[in-house]
Image (cartoon, grey):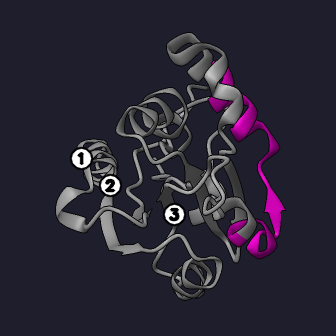
Amino acid sequence: MSKIPTPFRPLQISVLTVSDTRSLAEDTSGDALIAHLSAAGHSLYQRQLVKDDVYAMRAVVSQWIADSNNHVVLITGGTGFYSRDSTPEAMIPLFDKQIEGFGELFRQISYEEIGTSTIQSRAVAGLANKTLIFCLPGSTGACHTAWNGILKEQLDATHRPCNFVELLLGAYQPKLHKV
């Protein structure tokens, strides 16, 4: 018996840029993530830019994770070691489960590109109210790295042996026709 292939299932993805210095017009990292998710067949659900403030970030993301039409939140910025970098501190308390391997894999892939500087990345990810949240560094290059090295496959229902789409949308149930 042949296995029925799983079809691609588009997700609704929101992009949050955390920056004290950029505006949306200068947000090349957010633009890169939107270009990637659109090229992959997903839809941009919402986009916003906030200052690097724990409560401002939590306010936006809390609204997004309460919206059942929003499947994924991609956050760029605020994951470094500067005094104002507070994205992990803002998001980790919202997580129902942390995706431990995301930060580890991101730093492993980044090592090939930027060497030991990758240890200063505090990229994290988790699941909150059936919404995935990925916290990425603010550089455009890091956003390309995360998308191409991890997110593209993990947000694609056709990727095997596993991906996050079934967790978000439920298992694909093909309609079987009686002969």
**Residue identifier under label 2:** 30
Among the 4 quarters of the image, the one containing residue 45: bottom left
- For image coordinates 26% across by 48% down, the residue present is 28
Looking at the image, can residue 58 be seen? yes
Residue 17 in the figure: left or right of residue 71: left
- Mark 2 lies on a secondary structure that is helix
The residue pinned by badge 1 equals 35
* Residue under the image location 46 percent in, 29 percent down: 145
Residue 50 point in image, percent of width and height: 43, 75
Pick whichever, 111 or 1, lies toward us: 111
**In the rendered structure, which disc, 3 or 2, sits on the residue that comes first in sequence?**
2
Q: Position of residue 136 (x, y in %)?
A: 54, 48
Q: Please identify the quadrant where the N terminus is shown.
A: top right
Element class at badge 3: strand
Vertical placement of residue 114 versus 3, above or below: above
Q: Secondary structure at mark 1?
A: helix
The residue positioned 47% from the left and 42% from the top of the image is 156
- Is 7 a magenta residue? no
Q: Residue at x 51, y 63 (%)?
A: 72
Stretch in magenta: 90-108
Quadrant position of residue 58: bottom right
Lower sequence index among marks 1 and 3: 1
Q: As shown in the figure, which amino acid type bears the numbered disc 2?
A: Gly
**Amino acid type, residue under disc 3 in the picture:** Val
Q: Taking 140 as reference, is 61 left or right?
A: right
Q: Are marks 3 and 2 in contact (CB under 8 Å)?
A: no
Contact between marks 1 and 3 (CB within 8 A): the answer is no
Left or right: where 3 falls relative to 25:
right
Of marks 2 and 1, which one's residue comes earlier in the chain?
2
Q: Is residue 126 above or below residue 20?
A: above
